Amino acid sequence: MTAKDVEALLGTLSRLPDVEAENLQAFDATDGLLLDTATDVVGPDTNVVVIGDRYGALTLGASAGLGVGHVRVHQDLVTGRLALRRNAVSAGLDGRFTEYELDRELLAGAEVVLLQLPKSLAELEEIADAVARFAAPHAVLLAGGRVKHMTLGMNEVLERYFSSVRPQLARQKSRVLMASNPKPAPGEQPFPVVESLPELGITVCAHGAAFSGARLDIGTRFLLTFLDRMPASRTAVDLGCGTGILATMYALHHPDARVVATDQSAAAVASARATTAANGLGQRVAVIHDDAMSTLEPGSADLILLNPPFHLGSSVHAGAALKMFQAAARVLAPGGELWTVYNSHLQYRSALERNIGPTVEEGRNPKFTVTRSRKS
């Protein structure tokens, strides 16, 4: 394929089943810059791994544009995995990649790794450690991002794991960091991080990409102050569970409940499984990698707890929360309740009324609002 052919391919990509909107794209200039930079180090027989591909641009671009026979790929979000599969079929490139978790199997023998830089330095550190630990000794990591989101801290993280880190020339407000000569792995893998939370009396485990790490984020802290008001239920769901703090606390307070924790992030799911196990709940809390509870039966939950995100990638967008409200409306049983905490300025109450049913404000502090919505 020519460069124009690859550009045309990227233009056909869809974000589905993720939220779609005019200001949200399935690829960006960083994808194109990473693929162009890789032409100098990738040949048809090069062992290529892609990490952080959002909707398939890097994986399919490497197959079609760089002529790579087979790509190993890791995507944290289940929506990205589903979009890649869908886009591969549309492009006639199905079967040209294999999906893995972030582990030895993904990176064994990897010579070139293409990475969309994550927002979190902790996530970047977990990736850099895995590449240095498991990839080929001569591996090259090409890590690209939008210049406005890149920090010197990213260089510092990479320099801990690679002997050479060289920023490349920027183009279209994107830049690539080329890291080479991986350093020997320093002892045990640093993730998941395990911390005790004395204020809750639990242990929290967190992989690098898990929101808020092993800390208690302030929205969840506020929602937990209403735990005694929440009804005892047969089945409760922690939707967008992150490290599983809400699921853990509810299960500890309601030992007879069946508790499900679900998140679209593989790192969050691994973190929540580790957190529930660390608190003796591994057999009582089911943790699912899923997109907006798509695998749960309609009307199957009596209670859903939700601290929704207000970003989609690097864009501030209400679409993720609205998708979760719609999912909650499907999964809640009649009379079931959705307890939501959100930044007060977002004013979600009308959307909750519209999607779920009667909604009351249970509490508000200077930053957050907690509401209870009853399924009509």
Image (tube, helix red, strand yellow):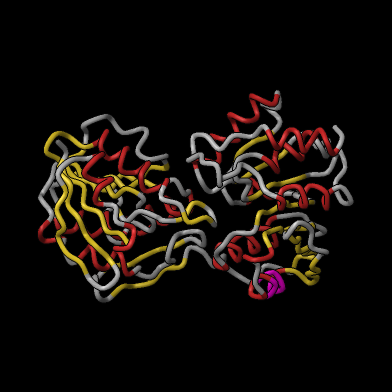
Q: Position of residue 167 (x, y in %)?
A: 79, 68
Residue plotted at (10% across, 49% down): 232
Nearer-the-camera pick, 3 or 180: 3
Q: Is residue 159 within the magenta segment?
A: yes
Of the 4 image quadrants, the one containing the N terminus is top right
Residue plotted at (25% across, 48% down): 350
Nearer-the-camera pick, 188 or 295: 295
Q: Position of residue 330 (x, y in %)?
A: 27, 33
Main secondary structure type of the part rendered in magenta? helix
Nearer-the-camera pick, 236 or 160: 236
Residue 245: quarter of image: bottom left
Q: Position of residue 202 (x, y in %)?
A: 27, 67
Q: Position of residue 114 (x, y in %)?
A: 72, 51
Residue plotted at (49% across, 41% down): 78
Residue 70: quarter of image: top right
Q: Is residue 248 within the magenta segment?
A: no
Q: Is residue 223 above or below residue 354?
A: below
- Left or right, residue 140 beside residue 277: right
Residue plotted at (79% across, 33% down): 64
- Left or right, residue 155 beside residue 302: right
What is the magenta range? 155-160
Nearer-the-camera pick, 262 or 152: 152
- Left or right, residue 208 beside residue 178: left
**Count of marks placed on residues:** 0
